[in-house]
Image: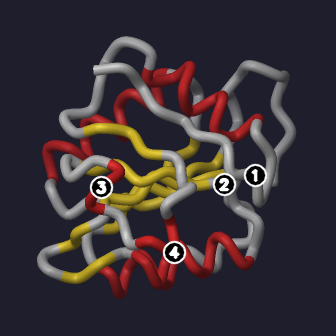
Amino acid sequence: MTTAPAGSLAGRRILVVDDEPLVAMLIEDLLRDEGVEVVGPASSLAQALELAGDPGLDGALLDVNLAGEFVYPVAEILRARDVPFAFVTGYGRAGLDPDFADAPVMPKPVPLVGFAREIVRLLARGPGAAARCEVPT
């Protein structure tokens, strides 16, 4: 993990997993505007599984459904490694696997206002915390 000033995303390495190219590009742009080094984006479960083992990850944003495959194996790897992550989904919290009911959720479409603030809060909560990271719609 990298060290960045509290409240800053500059220098952080965040994995982006989304199979929708336009959504992935939007998230990537929003993160890069904040000085983030984007890992990926991964558009398939296989790519995401490979990138989830990156030793320098500071966090991850995970689309729940990748062309019909669920991203939960990636979330399990990240949780075991104490890497903070949030699901980015249009299904809402009700669409999550019960094993991840306490995971942070960001809605799709991705909100432009407040996005960076919520990612900072996600990373600041620390590994393994069950705090919610929800952006108002």
Q: How would you rate the neighbour count of disc 3 (Cα within 10 Å): few for under 14, some for 14-19, many for 20 or more? A: few
Identify the residue at horizontal 29%, vertical 23% (top origin).
111
Q: Is 115 placed left or right of 132 in the picture?
A: left
Q: Which tag, 1 or 2, sits closer to the chain's start?
A: 2
Identify the residue at horizontal 46%, vertical 22% (top origin).
33
Nearer to us of marks 4 and 2 is 4
* Amino acid type at mark 3: Ala
* Amino acid type at mark 1: Ala
Q: Element at badge 1?
A: loop
Residue 129: mark: 1
Asked if the residue at tag 2 contacts the one at tag 4, i.e. Cβ–Cβ closer than 8 Å, the answer is no
**Percent position of residue 70, x then y:** 29, 78
Q: Based on the displayed image, in which of its 4 quarters is residue 9 positioned?
A: top right
Q: Which tag, 3 or 2, sits closer to the chain's start?
A: 2
Query: Looking at the figure, which quarter contains the C terminus?
Result: top left
Q: Is 33 placed left or right of 124 in the picture?
A: left
| Mark pair 1, 4: CA separation | 14 Å
Nearer to us of marks 3 and 1 is 3
Q: Element at badge 2?
A: loop
Identify the residue at horizontal 66%, vertical 54% (top origin).
84
Q: Which residue is mark 4?
A: 99
Residue 94: mark: 3
Residue 84: mark: 2
| Mark pair 4, 2: CA separation | 15 Å
Q: Which tag, 4 or 3, sits closer to the chain's start?
A: 3
